[in-house]
Amino acid sequence: MERPGGSHSARASPPTRGAMPHPAGIRCQPAPATTYGVRMSSGVRELRDWQESVALAGDVIRAVRQGIRRETKAVSEAPMATSMTVATLIADGYARVTPAEQREAYQTARRAVLRLETELAILKHADLLPNGAFSELTTRGAQVSKLLGGYLAYLDRQIDDAARAPSRSGGPTPPVGPAVSPGSARGPS
């Protein structure tokens, strides 16, 4: 029996009950594992400056959240966001490959710590943050800044050592031997 608008044979036949578009072996295999260049999730947890910055961010959020009011919400949210920025910048610095890139990220984190201390001082001055919490948070912020400063000094030494090392590109190498000053090259007088 033919249907209106075409013949029965022109219609696509439905797939049979047992047929699958892909063999079961391909379809049921787990997805291939994705590898990442940096194993940040395990190594960054070992960094003391990251641990301290995460603890500082948690303390800032707990201390500031208690005094948030609708009319001061924008002022109160700024130090919470900045404290989280410090921790994420440290993690970003850890994920960088070259010492120069790491240095840039850690310097940005150190500037964020200074911004956080300024925002906390503003909250204290506006009576939105108790004195005890302010002194504790600024002490912890100073500790994070000190740890960042130590790591920045280490990175500066690495960058300086790499700049002083002779290049392996086949360029001229400095002469080896005692340095001769212009005055010592004269013969006996």
Image: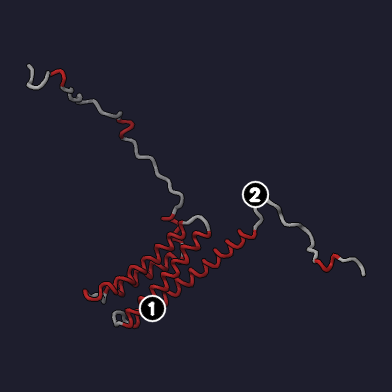
Q: Is residue 172 above or below residue 124?
A: above
Q: Horizontal and vertical percent for residue 23?
A: 30, 28
Q: Nearer the viewer, residue 126 or 150?
A: 126
Q: Horizontal and vertical percent for residue 33?
A: 39, 42
Task: Tell me which corner region of the image, top left, top right, bottom left or bottom right, holds residue 40.
Answer: bottom left
Q: Horizontal and vertical percent for residue 81?
A: 33, 67
Task: Tell me which corner region of the image, top left, top right, bottom left or bottom right, holds residue 120.
Answer: bottom left
Is the N terminus in the top left, top right, bottom left or bottom right quadrant? Answer: top left
Q: CA distance from mark 2 to mark 1?
A: 52 Å
Q: Residue at x 46, y 72 (%)?
A: 145
Q: Amino acid at mark 1?
A: Glu
Is the C terminus in the top left, top right, bottom left or bottom right quadrant? Answer: bottom right
Q: How many marks?
A: 2
Q: Nearer the viewer, residue 56 or 92?
A: 92
Label 1: element kind: helix
Q: Is residue 171 above or below residue 85?
A: above
Q: Residue at x 7, y 21 (%)?
A: 4
Mark 2 vs mark 1: give the one in front.
Answer: 2
Read off the residue under disc 1.
Answer: 136
Neighbour tally class for label 2: few under 14, some 14-19, many 20 plus, Cα within 10 Å: few
Which circle's residue, 2 or 1, is located before the other in the chain? 1
Question: Residue 169 bears which disc, if any?
Answer: 2
Label 2: element kind: loop
